Amino acid sequence: MQSRLDKSPVATWWWTIDRWFLAAFLSLMGLGIILSFAASPAVAERIGLDSFHFATRQVIFTIPALIVMLAVSFLEARQIRRMSLVMLCIMLVLMVAVLYIGVEVKGARRWVSLAGLSIQPSEFLKPAFVIICAWLFAEHKRQPDIPGNLFAMLLLALVISLLVAQPDLGQTMLVTGTWGVMFFMAGLPWLWIVALGIVGASGLFAAYSVFPHVALRIDKFLTGEGDTFQVDMGREALINGSWFGVGPGEGTVKRIVPDAHTDFVFSVAGEEFGLIMCFFIMSIFAFIVLRGLSIALKEHDDFTRYAVGGLVTVFGLQSAINMCVNLQLMPAKGMTLPFISYGGSSQIAIAISMGMVLALTRKRPERRKQMGFVLAQRAMPAE
């Protein structure tokens, strides 16, 4: 245990970190390892790999993810902005490169191989995009003559263009929704809300008209016809698990669903550990989002407020999409469950995002004292 009199960086970090956030993130990482051992052996055996191939790799991915999250949580806001700017530039270049040299999977080019590692640039782009947009919104509010909102719109258009080109419409919706929440937090006029709503609806209609696989998924969801095998089995697994589950290792969905260890790990959890486990997982995600938005609401610094709000929003939306697909509440979409689904790029990218949340929500008495002084000065009557 660190003493409060200890002024070392580690001790200062320990006494200023939001331990509720830290406990929630560690809990999700632990659940990810447990559910990987439950869901992945049958998938690995079906494709001729060692039974614990994916489970072992999940543990391997979690270790650097934990290190990255803790390392990022030591940074100051200025350092986070600089890191995000560099990461954004690199990922934009990689997202252009992926269109030409990317690995094609199921008709989409979303991954690029570097030094033997498969990386999905869009996963790392999200936290950097949120931080830079938060900075642009904050700068515009601080000095209205700075066209921060315009630059944020142009950046959104660039990111959406690259995502649609892959195509990755799920990430497009996720990024656009998060950007809209941040813009709303920044105080956009109601006219903008209506205009953006019309643009969003037009984009969905265009996606339905242009991309056959999008139209097929939506039609299958609305009519129940066609190949709905995976989502049907995911829902049946949750029903079969009832309240307390059929027991660890006794589930059936993981033996027949190809993506049981990634997109449908939530269904595996429900079947083997019951709806109680599902509610527990949902409560952790809800706690993170609500606590993040609550802290953002009380924050006086505009950049911190928009950044924390945006990071927990993209985290919450991604988890909600994954769970809704498992519950057959929305069309199927390959979206991982943060910290729980198998995946290296996803684990590290989410760890960076949540490390930023830990860094930006650390208690900083000197900043609060300075902000309180500024507010007091503003409240004093002019002589």
Image (cartoon, rainbow, N blue to C red):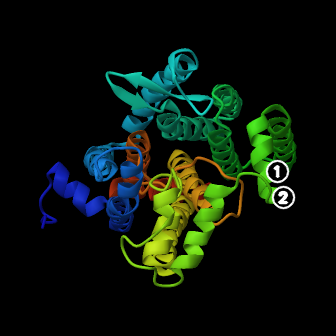
In this view of the protein, which residue sits in the foreground, 56 or 185? 56
At x 43%, y 47%, the residue is: 350
Q: On the rendered image, what quadrant is the C terminus found in? A: bottom right
The amino acid marked with disc number 2 is Thr
Q: On the rendered image, what quadrant is the N terminus found in? A: bottom left
In the rendered structure, find residue 206 and report the number of the disc placed on it.
Answer: none
Q: x%, y% of residue 216? A: 78, 44
At x 77%, y 56%, the residue is: 221
* Residue 76 appears anywhere in the view: yes
In the rendered structure, find residue 219 and report the number of the disc placed on it.
Answer: 1
**Circle 2 sits on which residue?**
223
* Residue 288 appears anywhere in the view: no
Q: x%, y% of residue 338? A: 47, 54
CA separation in Å, label 2 and label 1: 6 Å
In this view of the protein, which residue sits in the foreground, 164 or 14? 164
Q: x%, y% of residue 329? A: 70, 64
Q: Secondary structure at mark 1?
A: helix
Q: Residues within 10 Å of mark 1 (few under 14, many from 20)?
A: some
At x 86%, y 35%, the residue is: 209
At x 75%, y 41%, the residue is: 214
The amino acid marked with disc number 1 is Asp
